[in-house]
């Protein structure tokens, strides 16, 4: 997409303060794709990799990889595998040359592709330095295609309503850079059912969950009577929540934790009463027709 020079200049001044001017003036005129080429300073690259806790078993994808610096640094520092995707053939050539110089060609792959068409479903870590609009356009694909638990780090641009799980800033001489971090949540929305998690009882459980990104709220029905879930937490495919109920005059807290896999959850339940604590297992199934989009329809808080 060719933009006119004045608009490009204006946009670049707004979104990449100082960087474009100070490093390579040709960036200003070279805005022919969805995002101009501006490299992430190495101090910020290091913070991004630290925040995502990249390790040797990871497969890191940089969408819009520029000169390959994030992929190459990750591979060199952690021994992970890395894939860089960029639409500009010049950047891919640069990345390959840089990877060869760094001696990491056996663990990296660079591919000239449009990031909106690329398959990055094998990633365990995704890094981004794009634009706000591009992040938002990419957000549904990130949430739909990536495995729950995949870590996503973005330099300077947020995901708006999908609030970051962690955020930090890197202060450099010219300006302060923002780093956003998310863990892709499983979709746990809908109605889950199971029987007698405590084993001996014949209780019927129905859990109605609403979700907006990683935030959840809902109600647990035990034999038809509803209890609001408290301290609901979803991290990747790990769900936990608590409910309080009164059983035979005694107040009881039930702490559910479980791992979500498609339409099933398996996990453990700690039941705490005044006098005793008991652990048991629970296994729930979801009616697939009750699943909602992960973005949620209402704002949860
Ligand atoms: C701001 S630079 C970031 C480079 C690198 N990730 C870094 O942080 O140093 C954005 C990169 O995205 C690339 N790009 C722009 N639109 C793209 C698209 N549709 N598909 C893939 N890459 C794209 C540009 O060529 C550019 O290299």
Image (cartoon, helix red, strand yellow):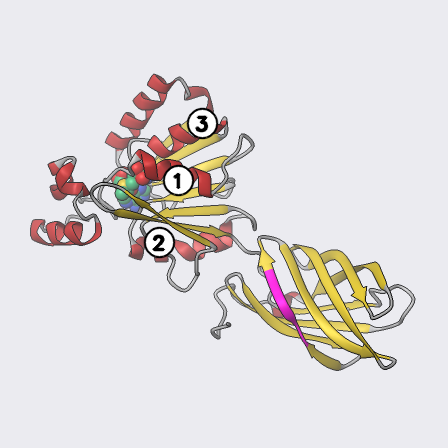
Circle 3 Cα neighbour tier, 10 Å, few/some/many (<14 / 14–19 / ≥20)? few
Q: Position of residue 54 (x, y in %)?
A: 49, 36
Residue situated furthest left in the rendering:
6
Magenta span of residues: 228-233
Where does label 2 land, which residue? 135
SS for tag 2? helix
Identity of the residue drawn at 19% across and 42% down: 19
Of 174 and 49, which appears nearest the observer? 174
**Horizontal side of residue 279 vs 22, given as left or right:** right
Q: Is residue 119 visible?
A: no
204 to 170, vertically: above or below: below
Q: Which mark is residue 77?
A: 3
Give the residue pinned by disc 1.
Answer: 47
Against 95, is 136 above or below? below
Can residue 85 be seen here? The reply is: yes
Measuring 70% from the left and 78% from the top, which residue is drawn there?
227
User: Any mark on residue 90, and which?
Assistant: none
> First in sequence: mark 3 or mark 2?
3
């Amino acid at each position: 997409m060719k933009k006119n020079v004045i608009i490009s200049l204006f946009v670049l001044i707004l979104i990449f303060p100082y960087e474009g001017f100070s490093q390579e003036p040709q960036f200003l005129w070279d805005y022919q794709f969805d995002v101009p080429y501006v490299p992430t300073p190495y101090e910020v690259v290091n913070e991004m990799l630290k925040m995502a806790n990249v390790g040797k078993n990871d497969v890191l994808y940089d969408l819009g990889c520029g000169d390959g610096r994030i992929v190459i640094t990750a591979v060199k520092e952690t021994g992970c595998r890395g894939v860089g995707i960029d639409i500009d053939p010049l950047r891919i050539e640069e990345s390959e040359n840089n990877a060869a110089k760094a001696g990491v060609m056996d663990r990296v792959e660079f591919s000239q592709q449009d990031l909106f068409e690329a398959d990055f479903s094998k990633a365990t870590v995704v890094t981004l330095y794009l634009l706000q609009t591009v992040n938002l356009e990419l957000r549904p694909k990130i949430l739909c295609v990536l495995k729950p638990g995949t870590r996503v780090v973005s330099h300077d641009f947020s995901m708006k309503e999908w609030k970051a799980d962690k955020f930090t800033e890197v202060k450099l001489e010219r300006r302060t850079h923002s780093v956003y971090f998310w863990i892709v949540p499983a979709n746990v929305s809908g109605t889950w059912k199971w029987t007698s998690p405590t084993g001996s009882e014949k209780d019927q459980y129905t859990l109605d969950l609403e979700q907006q990104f990683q935030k959840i709220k809902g109600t647990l029905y035990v034999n038809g009577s509803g209890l609001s879930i408290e301290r609901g937490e979803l991290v990747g495919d790990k769900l936990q929540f608590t409910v309080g109920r009164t059983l035979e005059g005694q107040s009881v807290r039930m702490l559910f934790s479980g791992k979500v896999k498609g339409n099933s959850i398996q996990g453990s339940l700690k039941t705490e009463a005044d006098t005793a604590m008991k652990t048991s297992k629970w296994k729930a199934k979801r009616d697939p027709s009750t699943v909602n989009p992960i973005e949620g329809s209402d704002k949860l808080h």
